[in-house]
Amino acid sequence: MSISTLLAALLALTSVAYIAGRRRAVVGSASAPIRTFHSLPGYYGGYVALWCLLPALALLAIWVVVEPIVLRAAVIDSLPPELAELPEDRFGLFLADVRNLVDGNLVFGAPDPAVQAAAERYAEVRKTSRHLLLGSLLVVGVASLVFALRRVQPAMRARIKVEKAIEYLLIGASLVAILTTIGIFLSVLFEALRFFRLVSPIDFLFGLEWSPQTAIREDQVGSSGAFGAVPLFVGTLLISGIAMLVAVPVGLMSAIYLSEYAGPRMRSWAKPLLELLAGIPTVVYGYFAALWVGPALRRLGDALGLEVASESALGAGLVMGIMIIPFVSSLSDDVINAVPQSLRDGSYGLGATKSETIRQVVLPAALPGIVGAVLLAVSRAIGETMIVVMAAGLAANLSLNPLEAVTTVTVQIVTLLVGDQEFDSAKTLAAFALGLVLFLVTLALNVVALRVVRKYREQYE
Amino acid sequence: MSEPGPVKPNEPPRTRDRVAEGLRRRYMKERAFRLLGLAALLFGLGFLAIFFVTLVSNGASALLQTRILLDVELDPEVIDPEGRRDAVALETANYQQLIRDALNRLFPDVTERSERRALYRLLSPAADLEVRELVLANPALIGETRSLWLLADDDVDMLIKGNIDRDVPESERRLSDAQIGWIDALLDEGRIERKLNRYFFTSGDSRDPELAGIFGATVGSFFMLLVTLVLSFPLGVATAVYLEEFAPRNRWTDLIEVNINNLAAVPSIVFGLLGLALFINAFGLPRSAPLVGGLVLTLMTLPVIIIASRAALKAVPPSIREAALGIGASKMQTVLHHVLPLALPGMLTGTIIGMARALGESAPLLMIGMVAFIVDIPESPLDPATALPVQIFLWADSPERAFVERTSAAILVLLAFLVVMNGIAILLRKRFERRY
């Protein structure tokens, strides 16, 4: 019996509860006809349904958490002693095998008899557990249903109670946003701390050498693993810098042209078209950077007699810049439009031309907002993954030459985590340390940028 | 004012002339600035154009696939020498042999073993599956000779589509001179044609480009979006309603608000790390499953939906709330019966846009194991699957030339989905947008 069947049964019971509660209010009784009830009948139905659902749901949630622990203990109890004394990680593997066998997942080869026996035991205990669960769910559900039904009286203010419950539901939903942030921070922080137990944070943040391949065997030569992240930071900054060199001038000039020069008709088609660039998935940009821009730059370099790596920082940066153009342009467009017309009129009145007004009046007035937009764009560029995974290099290369291949923080996170990995090696955990740095840097950029933009808006409101 | 006389050589330039000269320069600068702006705009739009032209010109050819016409003799001696004609015999029969025989009959002078093997390589390794399908569907055909258009190998396909250069020296080419000779012979007889590529739309991934399709990835993406939608829409709307209609203005709600804005700007790859550490490592959910992908994407889409829903709620005029409250509705009734229905189209628009963004997202999916090579079509959100953008990523990394056109075609399909979703959002907005 799966959890979803149980849930369905519970929901069925809940709808019965709703109908019963509503009916009780509609029918009323001789001493309490329907008009004496405080709330509409539906609220009494909802009241009973909530009473029926919530305790049972809580029970179900607790069961789901506790069941695996009990099952594990039951399986361990039944095991022959030599298996029960396996080291922790081997035992985890063994349990995973058992679970796979029970769930009918693919198991390669004939299963080990020990696994088979454990699996049978596991399935048996789980079956009992599920029957028990169904029974207790029904008991709890029906008991609370009856309890709530008896409270359906004219004086009971069902609407207020139901509305309170809905409000708590809404509060709960908005807490998810907070929990997500905390969850991200804690989960990444936790793994990063495990990494810093293996590698000192100083070495990580200031080390100049990055080669995360650690030795698999003790006696292996030449791959002790070095986790100095400076080459990654430099590479990230180089590629983001190139991207900003493309995106800021082009985006800003497009925004200026669209908001100050273009007529309403041109604006109405050019703006959405430009924003189309923002809707294209990043993997598509990555494909472009890797298959067309990279080779084209290489050929161009050959023609000019320059050595250009086919995964050069320039190619990835250029394409990333194009991706960010609409981001910069639509943010600056908002900002430029927020500059009051009176400032422009004053400038025209003094005889300035349009471009002089823009350069000497509008842009300085809009500068804080534009800076905010650029900061947001930088955080976008630093966190961008697919383009660099597909078009930037893999080897950490401490270089500021845009024609060479460099690697970035995001590329390293992906290469360290894609494929099979064990969760204890420094190699895997390093990805989380990098993720932590990435998260903190982008968070700081965003907080600053949002604050700057908000300050700026308030200035003209 | 007097007429401007001719400037005398040693008279200092008059103010008027200096102004005129200055004006000329200033107007020139003005024009230059304007042109610069136009150029910037055209740069962006130009890239967009290049982008689509490249994609369409590269991807269109993936719709057609080269096939070779062979007269296959469905020889009962080969298919079913014992004459049992039962399903097992028919399924395990050596259909490869039938195809080889047909090729040998076409090119009787190819006798050497290695040459023959090169000849057989003109056809896809899966061509025999098509013959098998035919025989299984209609066992009465055994014994006849049928003319079948069989799937050619991807290298043949690339040659026919002009992506393999015949002038390159033989050693650097994927097809030998002899193979090209046979292909030309087949072409002369009209035995090579491009037919609709059905595998592209109906099958999962494959190592053989001619068999690879996007259906598996599309189904994976569908399951993922389903999970995302089911979770993020109610949560997002509930959060927005609470923050906009009920929440008191205090430090806590400010914190939630700042949080949501920042969450919208966290790099997507960090969400992938969260998914890996939390959902897979701590909760023990299966790797590569659309369920986990959907959970991660939910967290990413939530801020988008919340922000859009709050904007939609803000757009409902206070008079509606006041009218409802005035005739005795409770706060909750006002919101649920009057405000929410009016704001719903705006919320749906935001949700669809959020979904479209989730559909195009790939970086966090790399972290949670959805980059695996998966041939089967997933049947539930718990089966291993890949997603459309990840499939594009995988194909873009493949060395075979034939995957280039497939990548472009898959991108076109992905973009088509995005266009449809955004189109629906725009229509919805147009249809239900109200000005109060």
Image: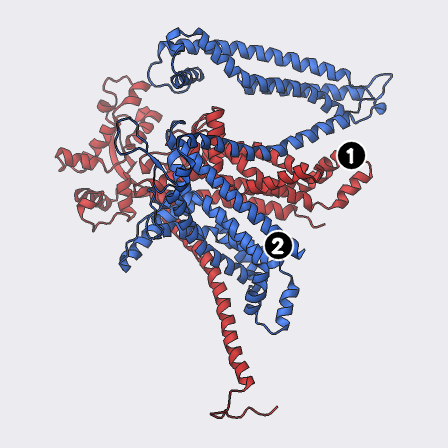
Chain colours: A blue, B red
Disc 2 crowd, CA 10 A, few/some/many (<14, 14-19, 20+): many
Q: Position of residue B43 (x, y in %)?
A: 45, 59
Q: Residue at x 64, y 18 (%)?
A: A56
**SS at mark 2 in the image:** helix
Crowd band around label 1 with a 10 angstrom C-alpha radius: few (<14), some (14–19), many (20+): some
Image side of residue A120 versus residue A211, left or right: right
Disc 1 residue type (three-letter):
Ser
Which structural element holds mark 1? Answer: loop
Chain at tag 2: A
Vertical order, B24 against B69 (above or below): below
Q: Position of residue A375 (x, y in %)?
A: 52, 50
Q: CA distance from mark 2 to mark 1?
A: 39 Å
Marker disc for residue B330: 1
Quadrant hosting residue B137? top left
Front residue of this view, candidates A59 and A453: A453
Q: Which quarter of the figure is the C terminus of chain A placed in?
A: bottom right
Residue A53, located in which quarter of the rendered image?
Answer: top right
Q: Which mark is residue A456?
A: 2
| Residue nearest the observer in this picture, A284 or A246 | A246
Residue A316 percent across, percent down from the top left? 39, 49
